[in-house]
Image: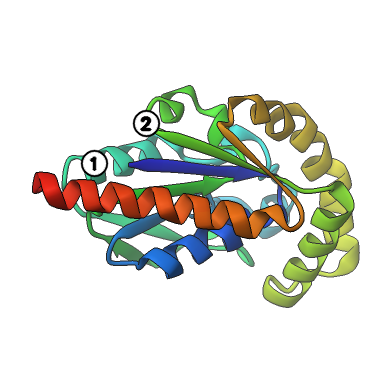
Amino acid sequence: MIIGICGGTGSGKTTIANKIVGSVGPENVNLIEQDSYYRNLADMPLDDRRQANFDHPDAVDNDLMINHLKRLIDGYPVEVPQYDFTTHTRMPNSQRLEPRTVTIVEGILIFNIPRLLEFLDLKVFVDTPDDIRLVRRIRRDMEERGRTLEQTLHQYEETIRPMHYEFVEPSKRQADIIIPEGTQIGITIELLCGLIREQLRSSEKSGV
């Protein structure tokens, strides 16, 4: 079972994905984050890296991500790259993922990849208002990625907001489930966990 969780930056999709994994158990569910597959910009000067458009589909190595998903489906482990958002380069270490019955794929642009959509059994879109997403993005960039308020707002104006309305927001029509910001999130997480547990029980019965 492959579940896609999409939504704009700061929508809460990563939090939801992690809560599902925590509830069902990492021994049963893999989490693939699209952020891990940003292209390595090590060959560019640091100032140029900072100006790159990370909110366009071309910023992601989609071929590698889909290849890894295929390998997991076929029963092979993969080495997921780890991305350093302070330098915009891939770290030398990777994260090994073993095949699991259920895999969650999470990212802002995953519903813009036709080849990836073919693998998704369930598509979930986290629909969160712009102001909430912006506040969360500012907090994350300043606390976790060492950026200033000015840098984050500049990126929001130049790429995040326009790319959201060009690519992310229209992709909502691909969703099977749309989660609005608010109390419905908890209910939806329980629903998704229930579907996953049913899939696990079915797999156990069939010996998969």
Q: Is residue 174 left or right of residue 140?
A: left
Describe the element under mark 2 as helix, strand or loop.
loop
Query: Is residue 155 placed above or below 125 in the rendered structure?
Result: below
Question: Where's residue 171, x and y in %?
Answer: 65, 28
Q: Name the foreground residue: 96 vs 21.
A: 21
Direction from residue 147 to residue 196 in the image, left or right: left
Residue 168: give x, y in percent of width and height: 69, 34
Up-down: is 101 above or below 84?
Answer: above
N-terminal-most mark, 2 or 1: 1
Q: Which mark is residue 73?
A: 1
Q: Position of residue 12 (x, y in %)?
A: 67, 57
- Which residue: 40% across, 48% down? 195
Colouring chosen for the image of the structure:
rainbow
The amino acid marked with disc number 2 is Phe
Amino acid type, residue under disc 1 in the picture: Ile
Locate residue 42, reporting x and y percent: 53, 55
